[in-house]
Image: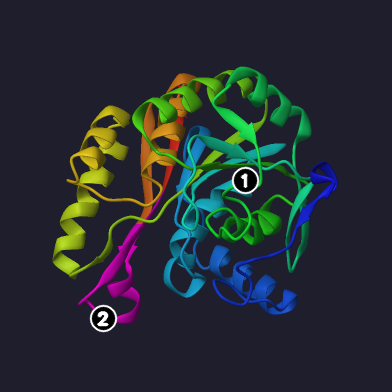
Amino acid sequence: MNEQAFIRPPAAAGIFYPDDADQLRNEVSGLISSEPPVKLSGSVFALVVPHAGYMYSGYTAARAFALVQEMKINTIILVGPSHREYFDGISIFPGAAYQTPLGSVFVDETMRTELLQRCPLVRCSLQGHRGEHSLEVQLPFLQQVARSCKILPIIVGDQRREYCMQLSEALAMIVHGKNVLLLASSDLSHYYPYEVAQTLDAAILSSLQQLDEEQLMHDLEAERAEACGGGPVVAVLAAAKKMGANSCSILHSCNSGDVTGDRESVVGYVSAAFWKRAS
């Protein structure tokens, strides 16, 4: 297989989101337009977005993508966890594009080369990309709000502290002076009773609001908080601060119990923006 020409077919369509193009387009449009975007008087550098099925976290995700439609970006760098295969290090998609029922989203090959040169820890590999949903579910939203945007899909196989910090350094360097947005894909706590989940998730929201990636990583390591994409969030938050972010806005937070009414075992979701206030 010629990996550079490979177009990754959808793996989550019909499971996490509709596999019919018209239905998908209508659902995404409806979610994004359900509320006016939050007005932030400054420059947005990065987002945190959940990645569950749209019926659970679609509204939360849409609050972040509603901001994107107001922005001029050429590339969005997507950083997510690997749910299905563990591997050491970090992988960047080696192919030409990710595909959804709405079409193909092409990879920024120049920026991929720059990241590989800047961060030896990152390797070009299909590991973590093959059946993973954490990045794919973001793409139909992106296709709705920034149709010509390219992507840089990154999967963190091992979320240890030093890997996340190395990635943050490299990301901050390669995006300097470019119209690029960072996105960390993560859900929060998994399968706790409603009140327990709220406590765990509140710790993460606090670290985000304080722009404190060290506290966030410390809480994750000590199991005082939980997020399947905690490492990607740490890396993106640290990079955003290096880019100039000095504020965080929590755009929406909830858990699956708020959606379904079942509070016995819930999953938490948050969307947030890291941005710089206009002086």
The image quarter containing residue 263 is: bottom left
Amino acid type indicated by mark 2: Asp
Q: Residue at x 69, y 65 (%)?
A: 10
Amino acid type indicated by mark 1: Glu
Q: Quadrant of the C terminus?
A: top left
- Residue assigned mark 2: 262
Q: Is residue 268 magenta?
A: yes
Answer whether residue 67 is visible to the viewer in this image: yes
Tag in front: 2 or 1: 2
- Residue assigned mark 1: 70
As drawn, 170 above or below 37: above
In terms of sequence position, does the residue under pointer 2 or pointer 1 come before the other?
A: 1
| Left or right: where 130 falls relative to 36 | right
Indicate the secondary structure of the residue bearing disc 2: loop
Task: Give 149 or 154, whichever is nearer the viewer.
Answer: 154
Residue span colored magenta: 253-271
Q: Residue at x 26, y 45 (%)?
A: 204
Answer whether residue 73 is visible to the viewer in this image: no
Task: Give 247 or 110, whichever is nearer the viewer.
Answer: 110
Indicate the secondary structure of the residue bearing disc 1: loop
Task: Give 11 or 64, whichever is nearer the viewer.
Answer: 11
Q: Position of residue 206 (x, y in %)?
A: 23, 41
Task: Give 227 or 123, whichever is nearer the viewer.
Answer: 123
As drawn, 210 above or below 31: above
Spatial distance from mark 2 to mark 1, Cα to Cα? 35 Å
The image quarter containing residue 265 is: bottom left
